[in-house]
Image (cartoon, grey):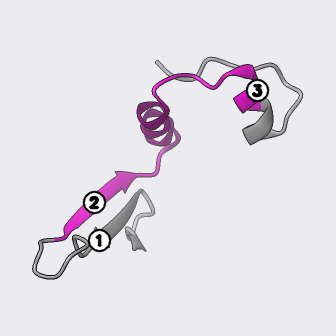
């Protein structure tokens, strides 16, 4: 795992998980917009009110963040 020289990307590498298999290198943008897009893609939805409270531990009302 490494951060690019300009700090804009996280680069990770894996061995593929088994002997003799090809691994892969993944580059992820670290901009706030890119991180939100990735989180939304993984979650598949905006946070519910309960998730918002649990994960962010804030009294602010939930905000729609996923496009």
Please determine whether, in this image, residue 35 is positioned above or below residue 14: above
Look at the numbered disc 2 and give the secondary structure of its residue: strand
For the N terminus, give its image quadrant: bottom left
Point out which mark residue 50 bears.
3
| Up-down relation of residue 50 to residue 64 (above or below) | below
Q: In the rendering, at what x and y percent does residue 59 appear?
A: 89, 28
**Tag shown at residue 31:** none
Q: Residue at x 23, y 65 (%)?
A: 25
Instruction: Give the mark, 3 or 1, whose residue is nearer the N terminus.
Output: 1
Q: Count residues near mark 1 (Cα–Cα under 10 Å), then give few for <14, some for 14-19, many for 20+.
A: few
Write down the residue under mark 1.
13
Q: Which residue position is annotated with label 2? A: 26
Question: In the image, what residue occupies the spot 49% across and 33% down?
Answer: 43
Foreground mark, 3 or 2, reads 3
The residue drawn where x is 51% and y is 35% is 36
Depth check: give the residue in front, 20 or 24: 20
Magenta span covers which residues?
23-52
User: Which label sits in the foreground, 3 or 1?
Assistant: 3
Q: Is residue 9 above or below residue 49?
A: below
Earlier-in-chain disc, 3 versus 2:
2
**In the picture provided, is 64 more to the left or to the right than 61?**
left
Label 3: which secondary element = helix
Q: What is the x, y in percent for residue 22?
A: 12, 71
Q: Are marks 1 and 2 in contact (CB under 8 Å)?
A: yes
C-alpha span from label 3 to label 1: 34 Å
Is 23 positioned to the left or the right of 20 in the image?
A: right
């Amino acid at each position: 795992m490494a951060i690019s020289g300009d700090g804009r990307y996280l680069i990770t590498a894996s061995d593929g998980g088994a002997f003799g298999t090809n691994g892969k290198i993944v580059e992820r943008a670290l901009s706030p917009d890119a991180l939100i897009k990735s989180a939304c893609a993984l979650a598949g939805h905006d946070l519910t009110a309960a998730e918002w409270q649990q994960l962010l531990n804030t009294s602010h009302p939930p905000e729609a963040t996923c496009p």
